[in-house]
Amino acid sequence: MADKTMPDLEPMDTSDVDRWIGVPVGGPVLKDPITANDIRRWTQAMQNPNRLFYDEEFAAKSVYGTLIAPQSFSVACADGHGAQPAIQGVVPGSHMLFGGDEWWFYGPRIYPGDKFTVERALFDYRVTHTKFAGPTMFSRGDTTYKNQRGQVVAKQRSTSIRYLASNARRLRSFADQEQEPQWTPEELEKVEREKFAYYSTFHDHVIRKFGDIADGEDLPVRPIGPHTIQSFTTEYRANPSNVWGAAYNDPLPSSTLNAGWLPEMSRDESKAQLDPTYGDGLYYGPSRGHVFTPYARLIGMPRGYGYGRTMGAWVLDYLNNWAGELGFIVHSNSRYIGPALTGDVTYLTGKVIKKEADEASGYGIVTVDVEMKNQEGRLMAKGPAEVRFPLK
């Protein structure tokens, strides 16, 4: 007998997706080299006051001798938050949320003056049933970031959660989170003290080697927030490709802009020829739900919500700050389980769960399990990362 308590859900048509698997796809590419202010703007938007990434005098005294970008900046070296290759094939009536990011880093750091190209392709997908939207597609797409020397800097495998917005509205799985929390002045002051306690852990030069790290070591707690429409907008605008005219489209095919979006969440490329706002994505297009509550609820979200790309950046910045100038993230795999919502505070924690030394290479790998929760303890993200340190 059918469950009468469940609303009727629409089926999901994924028939157009198969033809895109493994096919190189196109998208915007930055026209100009990365500038120091691009890196500073990103660092500021990620609320990460690590002087290595914005203060050239401090950076000059580091092991790098100059300003560098955090490893999280890789995702800003292309358009689409790294999700474009995971949004291929038309799924009528659909929207998408980030479901996770897996990163591989190959060694080159990012400096002002670097110029990037990218390679993109849909990797795979599966359809399952979720309580958020019923039939739901989890598609994974790969973006490979290369600098002007042809070096592979990073590879990102982004998971896109594609679902029917009408089903998500029917199920209302976030109905209990439609109201923002109310913070007292004392509670907000406590959050500020927690932030400053965290910032003090990397205000000076952090030099850590493999032997300095203890088995089972707890990383410091990182608070971020409370999140606001302004902070989410700042995050979006920190991507250099969001500047009008900053990127060109390479000639490869892509269905990202015609992926089956709702009319209210689609860009208008014709009007954008006169007013680029219509092709912007934030004011008009698929990102407007992040900053306009009515559009958030149109796609099944409770209120303004943050970017999956930014959640991934928070994790990478958290690891960079702890690892210091000698540490280097080689791999990270984070699943995004719940959103960062307006009014919430995000807390990152980490624990060392494994250490492996390789005497031949002179390096050791430290595996850290990272979790992200809000002030109520709701799990937002989780996953392991491997960080490389010199043995001596």
Image (cartoon, rainbow, N blue to C red):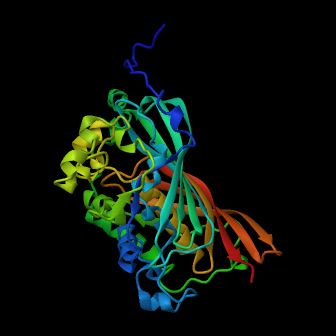
Residue 206 percent location from the top left of the image: 56, 83
Q: Residue 93 occupies which quadrant of the picture?
A: top left
Q: Which residue extends farthest top?
A: 1
User: Considering depth in this image, is 53 or 144 the residue closer to the camera?
Assistant: 144
Report the residue at 42% width, 72% height from top.
48
Residue 255 percent location from the top left of the image: 41, 41
User: Considering depth in this image, is 192 or 280 the residue closer to the camera?
Assistant: 280
Considering only vertical position in the picture, is 351 above or below 383? below
Residue 114 as seen in the image, left or right of residue 360: left
Residue 117 as seen in the image, left or right of residue 323: left
Q: Residue 241 occupies which quadrant of the picture?
A: bottom left
- Residue 378 seen from this side: no
Residue 218 percent location from the top left of the image: 61, 67
Report the residue at 71% width, 68% height from top.
365
Considering only vertical position in the picture, is 157 above or below 128? below
Q: Quadrant of the C terminus?
A: bottom right
